[in-house]
Amino acid sequence: MRRPRLVSCLDSGHGYSWESARDEACHYSFLPLDRAGEMRKSVETYLKNEKAKVVIFVDGKPALVKYQPKTAHMSFWLDAELGVPVDAEGQPVELIPFVIESSDDFLCEFGDRDPGSIFLGLCKKDGETPVFVQDIGCVSEEFLREHELIVKDARSAGPQICAEDSSLLALSNGLLRWHKNTQFCSKTGKKASEIVLGGHGRRVASIDGASTRSIYPRIDPAVIVVAMHGDWFLLGRKASWDAGRYSLLAGFVELGETFEEASVREVFEESGVKLNLQSLEYQRSQPWPFPQSLMVGFKGETLDFVNAASGFELLSRDGQNAAKHAGLLEQEINLYRSHLTVPEVHIDEDELEDARFFHSSWLVEHLQSSNEFRIPGKHALANRLIHQNLEQLSARADQAFLQLQQVPELGVPVESSNQMKYILLRASFASPDGSWKSKLILRGDPRAAYHNHVYTAAKTELALLDQSYSLQLDVLGGGRMEVDATEKSISVYGFSAAFGQAPHEITGAILRANLPFHSVNISYEGY
């Protein structure tokens, strides 16, 4: 069997670059073709074009080859001046699509299989190279070895290849799958044997044979939702996923439903959390033709956050008394408005294994440094939406507070079971405009016999962090904590004879933000 000629899809003489678009668009949104819908009626002419290229699929899956000098020109990578194509994670690719010339005898060996060569569009690089896809059906392992082909399904291959190639294969996958599933008309039951519009439609005779009916590919729109409670993100996971992987909640749009209504319904069905319909905002979308979806991203606030109280009303009667006695300011309590009103989550166990709220600061820290917690890769819309909204929250942060970032919010040991005395403190400093900026922090130590010992250790810690001694430290009360490391639970209770009782709701809010997988119980009883 003769080996097909390896051909270039791109003309290196054109200086086309998608660098700005590459920063904005999602994976699978980089189709390197002009769809050229106006050409679909006369597509046979373009298949005979000496420049025409054909992307090869094998029994429903794309044929790939290793990226190397002799095959590099087969990639549809549009930033050739940047060098080697990169995958969704920004790493050099190892695989690219297998592409041949339409005139190559290679295709003749496989006959005229339904649906034949499907017209995908014109190559954007030169604006004139027609590009097709064709499935050659089942082949032997010997054939694959002879042509050095690697066959993988389009969905799993997508993140491992460049955005242009993955977009091309995703479109090809969707069209080929549609043809496979549309051999017969759902209305008449007749064979839909006539391929029209270059493979973008099929035609079938009516029941009486007097007329014809055209059938076209359809998509199944789905919403994916950034459900937020202030600066908290609602994420969930399925039992089948790898350990530690969480993502945004998503689901298909139902008949007679808007995207916004679908967003509210899906979040409530899966987590029991209610979103405010009026808060829903469109974010961005992503093709997901595996086989025929379109992911549409929205962001919305919970009803609990929209309707939440403010100031001292956020605390219980005991909490208000403790806060006022400690000198906690109303504006400081309002900084924890979202912390203090996080809704309870009640998952649909048929859909999810777990769902919970994660504070934005915890996400930023653990997405940068943790291997035990992760979200979908950069090829996924969920990844883009989460990072996009984390960046927006960061951009809105008061720059003066950045000076307080060096002060850890949480300083209590939870790795092993213990009982400890703890104190709530205010770390503050005078900003250049003369106003005071502050941050509430927790410190505790199971070795401390008295709350004063915890305070002395905290002063020493901050003195080492702040050599200018500009930070001021005020104690806002204390209490006790009991940590059960096995059950991942923390009980906060009691008071400090030296500093009085801390507002334990604020303590609990800080603990929940920093320890999302722990349960926290609050009581103003006991010593």
Image: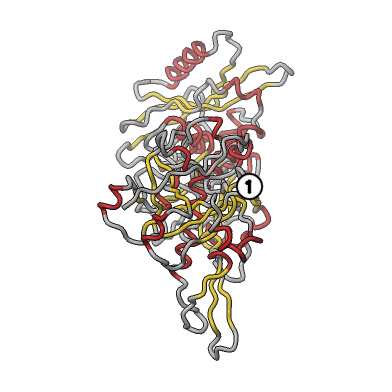
Mark 1: give few (<14), some (14-19) or many (20+) Cα within 10 Å.
few
Q: Which residue is mark 1?
A: 127
- State left or right for residue 325 relative to residue 104: right
Outermost top residue:
468
Secondary structure beneath label 1:
loop
Q: Quadrant of the C terminus?
A: top left
Amino acid beneath label 1: Gly
Q: Is residue 61 left or right of residue 9?
A: left
Residue 223, percent from left and from top: 56, 57
Residue at point 48%, 61% (across, down)? 117
How far across and down, in percent of the image, does residue 503 sit?
Answer: 53, 35
Coordinates of residue 375 in the picture (x, y in percent) = 45, 42
Against 15, residue 448 (above or below) is above
464 or 85: nearer the eye?
85
- The extreme bottom residue here reads 208
Q: Can you give x and y, in whole percent of width and height, for residue 504 in the image?
A: 50, 36
Q: Is residue 488 above or below residue 49?
A: above
Instruction: Using the rendered view, name the quadrant where residue 389 is placed.
Output: top right
Q: Nearer the viewer, residue 306 or 179?
A: 179
